[in-house]
Amino acid sequence: MTGKNKSNTNEKYLEYVSSISPKTNEIKTLFRAFLVGGIICSIGQGIRYLFSLVFGLEGEVLAGATSMVMIFLGSFLTGLGVYDRIGKFAGAGSIVPITGFANSVVSPAMEFKSEGFIYGLSAKMFTVAGPIIVFGVSGSVIVGIIYFIIGLF
């Protein structure tokens, strides 16, 4: 296939894709993402206030407890199939908060649970979030080593 024929084929394909793709209403999509992301963050802030006022938690303990509850809620709602519907409605507004990360860990595990506990649930759990965890831990180790070396001087 020559360069001109290949270019013509690509243009035809792009025209075809454009003709069958649904049109996006950007304002509506942005509003939904902002609304749902804000609601999720407001729920997290409410949990934070509750833990602070009722249990007297402070500092890192408060942040850790709030994060654990939000991760649990994201995982639980994913297991029930609710978080997928929230994601379909909100788009990026549902993946930005910590609950979106929990969803990215639990979703593949739920999808492959029929393959068993080891090869399905456990093996597929980190297919999406695994690289994020690996690079996050690796990056933090490198930054820690750099700070340690700077601290020696």
Image: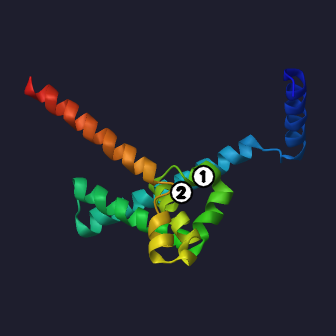
- Taking depth in this image into account, of 85 and 42 the one nearest to the observer is 85
Residue type marked 2: Ile
Left or right of 78 in this view: 23? right
In the image as oriented, which residue stretches furthest toward the front?
1
Q: Classify residue 152 by image quadrant.
A: top left
Q: Position of residue 69 (x, y in %)?
A: 38, 66
- The reply to whether discs 1 and 2 touch (Cβ–Cβ < 8 Å) is yes
Q: Position of residue 153 (x, y in %)?
A: 9, 22
Q: Quadrant of the N terminus?
A: top right
Q: What colour scheme governs how the chains and residues are painted in the rendered image of this protein?
A: rainbow
To which residue does mark 2 refer? 39
The crowd level at tag 2 (other Cα within 10 Å; few <14, some 14-19, many 20+) is: some
Left or right of 62 in this view: 135? right
Q: Is residue 74 visible from the viewing direction of this image?
A: no
- Taking depth in this image into account, of 149 and 76 the one nearest to the observer is 149
Residue type marked 1: Leu
To which residue does mark 1 refer? 35
Q: Is residue 24 above or below residue 84?
A: above
Residue at the location (50% across, 78% down)? Answer: 116
Q: CA distance from mark 1 to mark 2?
A: 6 Å
Residue at the location (55% across, 75% down)? Answer: 115
Residue at the location (20% across, 35% down)? Answer: 145
- Taking depth in this image into account, of 71 and 146 the one nearest to the observer is 146
Q: Is residue 103 visible from the viewing direction of this image?
A: yes
- Taking depth in this image into account, of 54 and 144 the one nearest to the observer is 144
